[in-house]
Image (tube, rainbow, N blue to C red):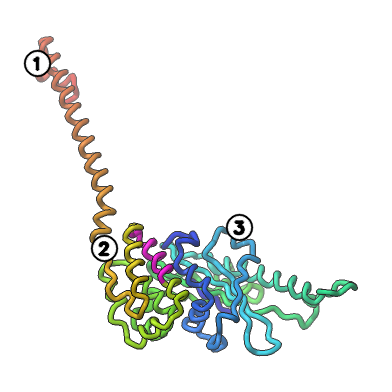
Amino acid sequence: MLCIMEAEQPREIKDSGFKILLDNHELFAEFMRDFVPLDIFKDLRAEDIEDVSGRYPSLEHDEIESDMVKKIRLHEPDTPPLFVIATIEHESQVNFRESFKVLRYMVEIWYNYEEEEDARTNEGESGGRKRPSRAKGFKYPPILAIALFDGPGTWNAEKNFMKKVWMNDVFAPYIPSFEYIVVDINRYDRDALVKFGDALSFVLLLDKVRREQDLPLLRDLPPGFMEFMSRLPDALKDLIIKVFRAFLEKAKIPRETIDDITYQIKERRGGGMFEHVEIDFQEIIRREKEPLEQELKRKEQEMQRKEQEMQHKQQTTMANLRALGLSDEQIMQAMGL
């Protein structure tokens, strides 16, 4: 069984560009087709996907608002659905309990599936309650956990839950054993993303714009790629701009600068909508440093003032002691100087 993961930024949904991204099922389908090495998803469509995250209370109990659960219907007749756990991991510290978190989700999903199947079987029945989940031939749906990692460094958490248990070599047959796949976005460069040739790859390119020298990533893109982007529905273009705005907010770019950038993009709309967008990162850095520099200057001035006051008090005290007839040596000893 597989699990895939997602990138440090605040965990709040409103600040997560990748949460916005995966909430859109057109882009979620592209994500599955691009990054999941299973042929079963090669024809996945947005209409095959249903978000069922609200059925699992642990999402709220753990306050992990970036996690989500998708229910996917396959095209083959008489085939049960499968479930995808998608987690977004973008903190600076790797989540070493990821496999345990996935195990909890799996148990909840399977339990909920039991309840739904039993309820569906008894719908409209007036007799005794039937429990198909208790039958010998009852089977549970497959679960694929997807982890999208966009944090700094390398993901080095153990991916097999069994290896997180003591004495797993002795008790291997009795311990749940499954893996999750890590999709490390930082390992995909511009050329690798462009090869996917879809809206998702363009959004992931946007996430790489974090410094002034990153801006060329959005320029001189292959003509075919930009032609595809120009034909996207306006609703999807609006979503891309929304995600780009979230990425800029993650980079702590001032709101007025973000407003100006997104206005420039919206005015273009076509394939070159990012061609001439300029972000003055030096000005952003200056604005961020200015309050810190002012505070540092204020503290230095305060220290100088206190030092001058102390020197004045010492000079006054020494003058008073001299007036009493003490020598300079006696004064220095008395004042501990």
Viewer-side residue, 241 vs 94? 241
Q: Position of residue 313 (x, y in %)?
A: 18, 22
Q: Which residue is mark 3?
A: 61
Looking at the rendered structure, the kind of residue marked 2 is Phe
Viewer-side residue, 210 vs 176? 210
Q: Which residue is mark 1?
A: 327
Mark 2 neighbour class, 10 Å CA radius: few under 14, some 14 to 19, many 20 or more: some
Looking at the rendered structure, the kind of residue marked 1 is Ser
Secondary structure under the numbered disc 2 in the rendered image: helix
Q: Which residue is mark 2?
A: 281
Secondary structure under the numbered disc 3 in the rendered image: helix
The quarter of the displayed image where residue 80 is located: bottom right
Secondary structure under the numbered disc 1 in the rendered image: loop
Label 2 to label 1, Cα distance in Å? 62 Å
Specify start and end residues of the magenta stretch as a single range.
241-253
Q: Position of residue 82 (x, y in %)?
A: 63, 79
